[in-house]
Image (spheres, coloured by chain):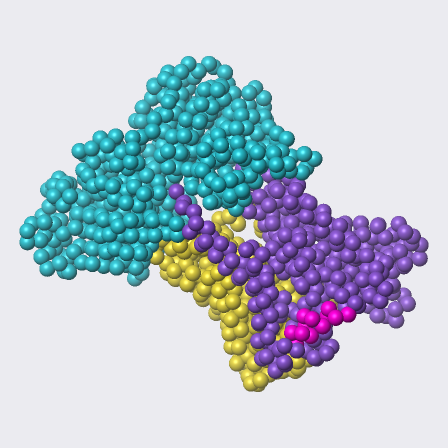
Chain colours: A yellow, B cyan, C purple
Amino acid sequence: MDGLDAAITILVGAIRAGTPLVFAALGELIAEKSGVLNLGVEGMMLVGAVVGFMATVATGSVYIGILASVAAGMLMALIFGILTLSLLTNQVATGLALTIFGVGLSAFLGIKYVGTPITGLKPLEIPFLTDIPVIGPLVFGHDLLIYFSFALFIGVAWFLYRSRAGLILRAVGESHDAAHALGYSVVGIRYLAVLFGGACAGLSGAYLSLVYTPQWAENMTAGRGWIALALVVFATWRPGRAMLGAYLFGGITIMGLHVQALGFEISSHLVATLPYLATIIVLAVISRDATKIRLNAPASLGRPFHPSA
Amino acid sequence: MRYQALRSFTQATNGNRLKVWSVRRFQSRTNIEGGRGLNGVMTPQLDLKEITKRYPGCLANDHVGLTVMPGEIHALLGENGAGKSTLVKIIYGVVKPDAGETWWNGAQVTIANPNTARALGIGMVFQHFNLFESLTVAENISLGIDPGHDLAKLTNEIGEISERYGLPINPHQHIHALSVGERQRVEIIRCLVQSPKLLIMDEPTSVLTPQEVEKLFETLRRLASEGCSILYISHKLDEIKTLCDTATVLRLGKVTAQCTPADETPKSLAEMMIGSALPVTKKPLDREIADDPLLELRSLDLPAADPLGTSLRDVTLTLNRGEVLGLAGVAGNGQKELLAAINGERLVPSNDILRLAGRDIGQDGPEQRRVLGLAFVPEERLGRGSVPEMSLAANTLLTWHHKGQVKNGFVDWAEVVREAGAIRETFDVRCPDVQVEAKSLSGGNLQKFIVGREILQEPEVLILGYPTWGVDVGAAAAIRQALLDLAASGAGVLIVSEDLDELFEMCDRIAVLAEGRLSPARRTGNTSVEELGLWMSGQFGPAGVSDAA
Amino acid sequence: MQYASPVIAAGLTMIAGIALFGALGTDPFLALYTFFVMPLTSLYSIGELLIKATPLLLCALGLIVGFRGNVWNIGAEGQLTMGAIASGGLALAVYGQDGPWLLPLMLLAGALGGLAWAAIPALLKTRFNANEILVSLMLTYVAVQVLGHLVHGPWRSPEGFNFPETRTFGDWGQLPILLEGTRLHAGVFVALVVFLAIWLFLSQSFQGFKVTVAGQAPAAAAYAGFSNKSVIWLSLMISGAAAGLAGTVEVMGTIQQLQPVISPGYGFAAIIVAFLGRLHPVGVVLASLLMSLMYLGGESLQMSMNLPLAVTGVFQGLLLFFVLGSDVLVRYRIRFIRSHQSEPA
């Protein structure tokens, strides 16, 4: 394998490995920008993954599967929303509960589907374009969801910084009391943001079970939901950096595999720790600058809102 | 009442009457007679009838009536907890009344939310600003008005208004970079871009220097002269006398009086407000304070820990034995940072910058400083001065644990409960027992408990941040008296406050904190509101010389 | 009144269980009987109940210290694993030359292993402000992979026919069985000692008071001069050591060797136990018994009714939702009643 080919393979691999993180991180970023910390990303992803897989098996259509994943993610997010936004439970504890519930529920739902084969979503094969050297595989050789993730990124960035709705969302995350006093429905806006986060997490799960490794396995997200949460901090709540970070982590995952393929004697177990160690290191480096976090983090992140006050 | 209002309306609008008249006729399609009835009586801009609002366990508004005429500056007067805030929140649609009618310009209306209020032409400047720190001035103003406007056009409009009403502001600046006075301007402009018919101002002057207050009054008078009604909420009697045409006085949720402030004395206004004469603190007049420094801070330079905070520059102060020293100034000028540095929550760069009774303590933490006799009452009562969901006993242990309450790492709860009981007795904290949670106490009661907790530890020096903020008149008087008694017993007392009246009443010397710098200290008798006001805007030149104590 | 919410939550979980089993087409009452009652019908299974409650209790006791102090260690599973690795490693290192000294030494090594693993998030939090939730969780994945590496590689038993497991520990590397005919081992005593220590710490010690203040009102803690860093260190080290002990008693008592998987999620379930027990040591004892019953119930459902073991996970999640939800409802009811009784000034 010559160097250029290897580089392209790694780059394409990094994008594929990073895409579930892109979805999950963009969704969580919107939720956090509205002031809600949802630690249940992992749980929403798992339920999204298994429900999408079941729907695909039942209908034979990957697209219906993807839609089912999105719906399942939103349903999970709705549970979180009802508890934290309407019943004012602690967001940290409820997010943990959502993940524990999602892990259990997905294992329960998916028990008969372990090992079931499906035909996943395939990369696009555009005649001629995909065959162009370098640019072909990098730009034209992806599956539909990857292109959708690009569009989603542009949409999220535009929404946050160019639209009035995005301005309102940021305002709610900055100070819910002020937003409430100005007549904005803090709870309503946060529900929408949380549901969007759930939809994205569901999509992320769908990418794993229907595209990346088209199969269902218990706990198949393997902590990606948590890495997505770390990515949002890493990105200091900016979509562009979240996207970049996601591909970086995708790259680290892929690199490990390639290093082994090159014949280095490294335990696969130790290679598997790389993304987690990288997350820890990146988190420490970014959080170190308290000023940056203070100026970028939504000021009411994680704080419950009592509309009566 | 109506006639009084009419009279003052005539005074206020003066030459602009015709203009106001035509504007109003244009607005009030709902009223067939236009603005004025056939019998010549004006239609009120706002007329509240029998407004009642009950919260669990308290009647915030009890059949309240309020009439505001067009172009009138109307005061809503009352002490903390009288129901002023609830009433204005009802007018602005933030709170729904349980009963009562709201009439707007002759038509009955229901104001379900702030959007409706704004659509009617009601603007409100809140006491605690509703601004978003990370957004720009223009974005903040955009959020406060109806959608469907162009941000660029709005920016121009902001420029025009700020020039016309003397409210200078840069629309592109982020809020966190603005001073408190500038933030208030943003709030006012946010109302003005919507050409309001009624502007509600909730305690607007507590955050301003005396000079800024003058500027604000000019703006308000100008607005009123253009026909905008102003509802001015305050408990400061002299302000109301200078500014307002009429006043409605609230006490314990009820209207106790309606009057023309110009015809009243501060004493009569105070009696309407609290139902009795103002309590007087007994201050020994012209005390001689010996030059005996207890607390010394020498040229403290401290960069802000919080990127949105204020850095302290070259702050020097001396507090003598038996002295009450006041630090005036608008919040946000380094008060929080200075208090944290003195309490030890933030250590100062070197040990000898801060001295307590001749001993260097700059590198000691709060617990060590407390052992050495430095006590502190912070600004926030709930969440800082006390843990809201802990009992008064546990809250006693919070700062009182270095005098035998903790043995071998374990707490002697019986001892702690005894001390909590002593605080409750001595300082008349009204609660069934010391096992009640701190958050169940009223503001004044809790403040008495916290001040009492610190005083009973017999400190050499007591530092207080805004000690009577939001406290009812009775409790405030008790707290002031306790502080004077403490000073008389030989301790040093340092009070940080925005309330100049309070400082003049209590202090032997007063200094001003502005933009992180401290002015020289003046003997209370040697200074004036005007001088302190000038200093609050930072104009005290390079380091001056303090008066001797 | 404040004890009502766990009871309400357990009741609601039961009702949700009936609905779930009904939807699966199983007789819900037979299923509930199998789940909640059958595990208690023999001496052996009561022994199993205590065995499973032991690591849950140990982890949860540590966690409540942190949760009270607003320090969110959710990596107890990883600290448990590291405790097992540390104590197991010691047993393997002295294999064949052990003596009575090994037993306390393994407990110590296990506690230190968990403590060291929890010290990483403590260090990163106090030094770099890194979120302890994410760091402690990431370290869980790392710990499990490290264990996998060890039992597949360097520590694999030479006599084990290439199975990914270590040798069985020597006699002094195993906790004694307490009750004939059961697997109940002396690990329950370890849990009992830790329970008493944590109870004393939280209710009577000044350090425990500081932790609670830091959790409920961080600004008040700063004002009083309680160092937030020491609260973070203290609570992470206590919870890490307790979780490490949990892993240690699990491998010394129940498994007696290292395997790729030594815990069916005890470290995560302990989070639920902590909340269900209202962050109180006594509550946590009861809650860990209930949670242990849920594990056994899942197994007994699988054996006698052929239902998936994952039912346990679903129940765990539901239970935590219901605890959090009914906690809020109960609290608001109290506030409502109070505010009607006393007139605020």
As drawn, the residue found furthest toward the right would be C97
Residue toward you, A220 or A8: A220
Tell me where residue A200 appears, x and y as whole percent: 52, 68
Which image quarter: residue B324? Answer: top left
Q: Residue at x 53, y 25 (%)?
A: B458
Q: Residue at x 38, y 18 (%)?
A: B284
Does residue C327 appear in the picture of this structure?
yes
| Side of B500 where B446 appears, left or right | right
Residue toward you, A185 or C284: C284
| Residue C30 to residue B519: above or below | below
| Side of B116 where B390 appears, left or right | right
Asked whether residue B62 is drawn in magenta, I would say: no
Residue toward you, B187 or A241: B187
Q: Quadrant of the C terminus of chain B?
A: top left
Q: Residue at x 66, y 53 (%)?
A: C282
Tell me where residue B246 appears, x and y as whole percent: 19, 40
Magenta span: C31-42
Residue toward you, A89 or C11: C11
Tell me where residue B88 appears, x and y as whole percent: 29, 49
Does residue A273 appear in the picture of this structure?
no
Q: Residue at x 60, y 39 (%)?
A: C226
